[in-house]
Image (spheres, rainbow, N blue to C red):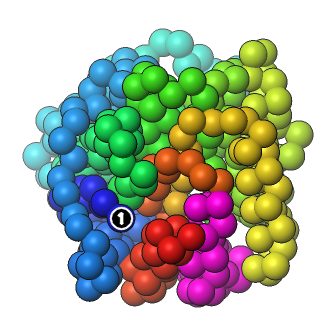
């Protein structure tokens, strides 16, 4: 499968994150994309660089003030104190209920909190460039589909599905899956479906399209009563306004088996077929793997081939976007299993 590789991903390499109150090495590492790249090369898949600048479509997915903040966040941080070059900024204050989010503060940490859903997206000097190259890959994939390509895989990081119109979170800064869906619409697809198979609910993507009937969002994920992102992803979230009926959440209890997961996939595929979409975007998180260190589903490597075959059965052109998956050494095999399962139908 034609793969767009985000070569800028390497510049986003945070040293640590906060996990259970302690500094730990990041789960979301550059090695993840390198394992996928190695496995793609070993199994004969061509890699290309993204060729489309996503700037225009990006501004229809994210808000201008969030994009302006993110693009300049690192230089603003460094300007506060030269020693900040060696430090990672984390938010520590957020405009929750009763506090105002319409006025952007001047203070850096206050702005960082305004544009963050959690403290789970460590920012580095290369974060903007890496995230922007990821949305460039997504826009490029949409252009390739319009030119007749049957499927394109975006091998990129950081992931994106927790990033909303104006916030980062859960290792995500910009949302390539949302950019792919929006770019497909602008390239002439009347209806697009987004299927999110990451272990975690794609709250950012859901919220971006929640009021729209042209982009159906379907997600299979750990039940938010116990699993991140906790505050979105319930089955009763079905869309609003014109988007009513165009959002489908299929939460599964933590610890669910592969059998239960594929049952949910059948329901997801049935809803996507009913949408009569012209194209599909798959948020391909691989943290449903049994060996994932921060998730609790139980898919094995051959189950990812089965996932690919099932998606091919929809008969749609597909943009695959890499999302989560933290068993890094197995990530390549699992990702390429999806791709080859799809190709082999
Ligand atoms: N720092 C994705 O899979 N919790 N994101 C981790 C807290 C957040 C996962 C521990 C998990 C986010 C794209
Ligand atoms: Zn995830």
Relative to 163, residue 122 above or below: below
Point 52% across, 60% down: residue: 284
Residue with the most extreme top position:
103
Residue with the most extreme left position:
82
Pointer 1: residues within 10 angstroms few (<14), some, or many (20+)? some
The residue at label 1 has a CB less than 8 Å from ligand 1: no
Residue with the most extreme right position:
236
| Residue of label 1 | 1
Magenta highlight range: 287-313
- Tally the numbered discs: 1
Q: Can residue 88 be seen at all in this image of the molecule?
A: no
Residue situated in front as seen by the camera: 180 or 15: 180
Quick one: quadrant of the N terminus?
bottom left
Please provide percent x and percent y for residue 239: 78, 28
Please provide percent x and percent y for residue 337: 49, 78
Point 82% across, 56% down: residue: 267
Please provide percent x and percent y for residue 181: 49, 35
Relative to 101, residue 337 above or below: below
Point 86% across, 46% down: residue: 235
Q: What secondary structure is found at the residue carrying circle 1?
A: loop
Please provide percent x and percent y for residue 52: 22, 36
Point 81% across, 24% down: residue: 244
Residue situated in front as seen by the camera: 229 or 140: 140
Quick one: quadrant of the C terminus?
bottom right
Asked whether residue 78 is drawn in magenta, I would say no
Residue situated in front as seen by the camera: 216 or 34: 216
């Amino acid at each position: 499968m034609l793969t767009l590789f985000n070569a800028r991903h390497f510049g986003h390499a945070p040293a640590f994150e906060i996990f259970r109150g302690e500094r730990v090495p990041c789960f979301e590492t550059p090695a993840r994309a390198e394992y996928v790249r190695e496995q793609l090369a070993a199994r004969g898949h061509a890699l290309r660089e993204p060729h489309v600048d996503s700037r225009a479509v990006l501004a229809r997915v994210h808000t201008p003030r969030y994009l302006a903040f993110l693009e300049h966040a690192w230089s603003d941080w460094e300007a506060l104190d030269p020693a900040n070059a060696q430090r990672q900024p984390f938010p520590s204050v957020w405009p929750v209920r009763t506090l105002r989010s319409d006025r952007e503060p001047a203070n850096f940490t206050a702005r960082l909190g305004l544009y963050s859903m959690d403290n789970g997206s460590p920012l580095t000097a290369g974060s903007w460039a890496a995230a922007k190259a990821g949305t460039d890959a997504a826009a490029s994939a949409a252009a390739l589909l319009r030119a007749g390509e049957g499927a394109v895989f975006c091998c990129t990081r950081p992931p994106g599905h927790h990033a909303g119109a104006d916030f980062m979170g859960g290792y995500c800064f910009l949302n390539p899956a949302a950019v792919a869906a929006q770019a497909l619409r602008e390239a002439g697809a009347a209806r697009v479906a987004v299927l999110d198979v990451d272990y975690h609910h794609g709250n950012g993507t859901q919220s971006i399209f929640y009021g729209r009937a042209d982009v159906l969002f379907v997600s299979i994920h750990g039940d938010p009563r116990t699993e991140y992102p906790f505050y979105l992803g319930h089955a009763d979230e079905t869309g609003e306004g014109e988007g009513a009926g165009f959002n489908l959440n299929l939460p599964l209890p933590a610890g669910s088996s592969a059998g239960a997961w594929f049952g949910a996939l059948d329901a997801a595929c049935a809803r996507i077929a009913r949408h009569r979409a012209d194209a599909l975007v798959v948020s391909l998180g691989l943290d449903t793997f049994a060996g994932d260190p921060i998730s609790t589903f139980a898919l094995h490597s051959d189950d990812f081939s089965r996932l690919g075959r099932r998606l091919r059965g929809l008969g749609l052109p597909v943009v695959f976007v890499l999302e989560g998956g933290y068993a890094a050494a197995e990530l390549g095999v699992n990702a390429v299993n999806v791709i080859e399962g799809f190709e082999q139908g």
